[in-house]
Image (tube, grey):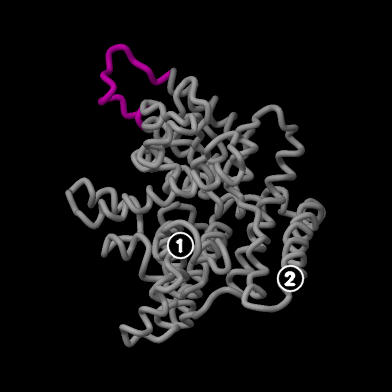
C-alpha cells in the first residue's frame, strides 16, 4: 500500500502498481471520467481484469487447468509481480531471514508458491516441492518450512484467519473485557496514532498529506507468523499480548480505511448487508448453531454485500464472525462424563455374533458420541476448521 490501497501487488480486483500515465491516457482516449477510472482500477482490474471473469485465484487456477489463456496470463502476471517485490525488498533490506507465505493464496496454492520461487537460486532460495505440496491444510496460527535442506534463505507457510482471530479475541479472548483489553488497546492506539502523527508532521501539506493512514497498520498475518516461527522461545504472556495488540491495531486500521479511504459507497448494497447482519444476529439469538447457516448468511450475504458496496470486506468478515456462537453446549467436564458413559455402553453393546451393520445399539451410541463431539466445539471453531480444511 502506498498513497492509496491501489499500490502494490496485483489484487483480486485492484490493478496494483501501474504506469502513472495510464489515467491520463484513459481520460484522453475514452469517455471515462476520473471517478470511473478510479473505480475501474480499484474494482474491475487486477486478477479480475486479467482473467476476464474471476477475482478468486482458486477459480483462476481451475480455469488454467482447462487451458484458458487469460487465466494463465493472470497467474503469470501475479507471480511475476510477487517475485519482483521479493527481489526489490531483498535489495532494500540487504537480505532477509526468511520468506513467509500467508493469506488465502499464500496458504492454499502450492503451485503459486512454486512458481513465485522459480529462478530464485541467485539469493539462496530453494524450494522443496514435496514439502510445498504438503503445506495446504495448516491450522490457524501454525507455520511450516517448505524450503529445501541447505537453502540459504528459508521459506515458511503460516496459516492465519484474521476475521476469526479478531472475533475470538473480542468474544472470549484478551479483548473480551475492558480490564483485559485496556493494555493492548492502549498500545494499539499509540502504535497507530504515533506513526500517523509523524507522517502528518513530515507531510503536512501537498499531495502526500492524505496518506497519513498508510503507516498505521500492523500486519496481523506477519505478526502472528513471526510468533509461530519463534515458537517456544517467546514467553506465552508475550505471545498473548502481541496477538491482542496486533488484532486491535489491525481493526483500527480497517476502520480508518472504511471511514477515510473509501472513494464511493453503494448505500443500497450496504443496506442489503445490514439485512443479512440482522438475520445473523437473529440466528444466534434463536440458538441456531449449524455452521452452514452462518456460512451462507455471512459469506454469501453480508460479506458479498459489503464487497459490492465499496466498504472494506474485512469489516464484514469481522462482524459476521462476531455473530457466530462462540460458546460450547457442553463443558469439558460434561463432555468427559458423557464420553465415559457412552464408551462404557458401547463396550457392553459389542457382540461377537452380531455383525456391525445389524448392531443398532452400537450405531445409536456412535451417533450420540458424534453429537457430543460437535457440542464440545463452538460453531465458530467448526466454521474455522471448514474454511481451512474444506
Mark 2–mark 1 CB contact (< 8 Å): no
Q: Nearer the viewer, residue 67 or 258?
A: 67
Q: Which residues are magenta?
A: 348-363
Q: Image quadrant for the N terminus?
A: bottom right
Q: Nearer the viewer, residue 158 or 317?
A: 158
Query: Residue 250 appears in which quarter of the rendering?
Result: bottom right
From the viewer's perspective, tell me whether residue 225 is left or right of residue 188.
left
Q: Within the image, what quadrant is residue 268 found in?
A: bottom left
Q: Is 80 in front, or is 288?
A: 80
Local packing at callout 1 (Cα closer than 10 Å; few below 14, some 14-19, many 20+) is some
Magenta stretch contains residue 357:
yes
Q: Residue at x 52, y 30 (%)?
A: 154
Residue at the spot x=67%, y=51% of the render?
246
Residue at point 69%, 56% (across, down): 248
Q: Is residue 53 left or right of residue 10?
A: left
Image mark for residue 251? none
Taking 214 as reference, is 209 above or below it?
below
Hey, which residue is sitting farthest top in the picture?
A: 352
Q: Distance of mark 2 from mark 1, alpha carbons?
A: 24 Å
The local secondary structure at tag 1 comes to loop
Please state the horizontal and vertical placement of residue 122, each as a whole percent of the image: 45, 33
Q: Circle 1 sits on which residue? A: 17
- The residue singled out by tag 2 in the image is 200
Q: Along the polypeptide, which appears first: circle 2 or circle 1?
A: 1
Amino acid at each position: 500500500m502506498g498513497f492509496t490501497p491501489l499500490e502494490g501487488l496485483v489484487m483480486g480486483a485492484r490493478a496494483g502498481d501501474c504506469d502513472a500515465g495510464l489515467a491520463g491516457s484513459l481520460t484522453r482516449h475514452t469517455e471515462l471520467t476520473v471517478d470511473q477510472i478510479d473505480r475501474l482500477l480499484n474494482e474491475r482490474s487486477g486478477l479480475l481484469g486479467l482473467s476476464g471473469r474471476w477475482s478468486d485465484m482458486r477459480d483462476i487456477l481451475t480455469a488454467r487447468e482447462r487451458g484458458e489463456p487469460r487465466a494463465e496470463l493472470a497467474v503469470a502476471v501475479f507471480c511475476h509481480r510477487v517475485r519482483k517485490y521479493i527481489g526489490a525488498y531483498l535489495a532494500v533490506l540487504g537480505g532477509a531471514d526468511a520468506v513467509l507465505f500467508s493469506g488465502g493464496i499464500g496458504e492454499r496454492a502450492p503451485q503459486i508458491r512454486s512458481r513465485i520461487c522459480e529462478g530464485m537460486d541467485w539469493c539462496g532460495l530453494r524450494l522443496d516441492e514435496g514439502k510445498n505440496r504438503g503445506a495446504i491444510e495448516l491450522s490457524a496460527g501454525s507455520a511450516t518450512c517448505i524450503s529445501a535442506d541447505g537453502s540459504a534463505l528459508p521459506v515458511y507457510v503460516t496459516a492465519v484467519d484474521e476475521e476469526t482471530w479478531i472475533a475470538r479475541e473480542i468474544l472470549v479472548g484478551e479483548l473480551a473485557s475492558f480490564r483485559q483489553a485496556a493494555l493492548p488497546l492502549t498500545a494499539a492506539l499509540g502504535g497507530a496514532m504515533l506513526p500517523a502523527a509523524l507522517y502528518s508532521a513530515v507531510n503536512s501539506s501537498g499531495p502526500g498529506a492524505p496518506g497519513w493512514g498508510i503507516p498505521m497498520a500492523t500486519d496481523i498475518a506477519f505478526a502472528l507468523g513471526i510468533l509461530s516461527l519463534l515458537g517456544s522461545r517467546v514467553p506465552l504472556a508475550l505471545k498473548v499480548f502481541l496477538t491482542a495488540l496486533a488484532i486491535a491495531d489491525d481493526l483500527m486500521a480497517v476502520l480508518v480505511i472504511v471511514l477515510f479511504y473509501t472513494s464511493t459507497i453503494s448505500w443500497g448494497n450496504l443496506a442489503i448487508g445490514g439485512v443479512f447482519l440482522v438475520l445473523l444476529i437473529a440466528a444466534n439469538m434463536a440458538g441456531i448453531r449449524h455452521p452452514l447457516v452462518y456460512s451462507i448468511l455471512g459469506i454469501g450475504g453480508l460479506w458479498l454485500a459489503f464487497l459490492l458496496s465499496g466498504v472494506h470486506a474485512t469489516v464484514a468478515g469481522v462482524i459476521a464472525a462476531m455473530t457466530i456462537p462462540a460458546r460450547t453446549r457442553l463443558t469439558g467436564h460434561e463432555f468427559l462424563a458423557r464420553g465415559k458413559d457412552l464408551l462404557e455402553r458401547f463396550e457392553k453393546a459389542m457382540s461377537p455374533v452380531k455383525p456391525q451393520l445389524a448392531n443398532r445399539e452400537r450405531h445409536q451410541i456412535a451417533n450420540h458420541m458424534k453429537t457430543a463431539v460437535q457440542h464440545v466445539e463452538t460453531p465458530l471453531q467448526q466454521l474455522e476448521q471448514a474454511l481451512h480444511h474444506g
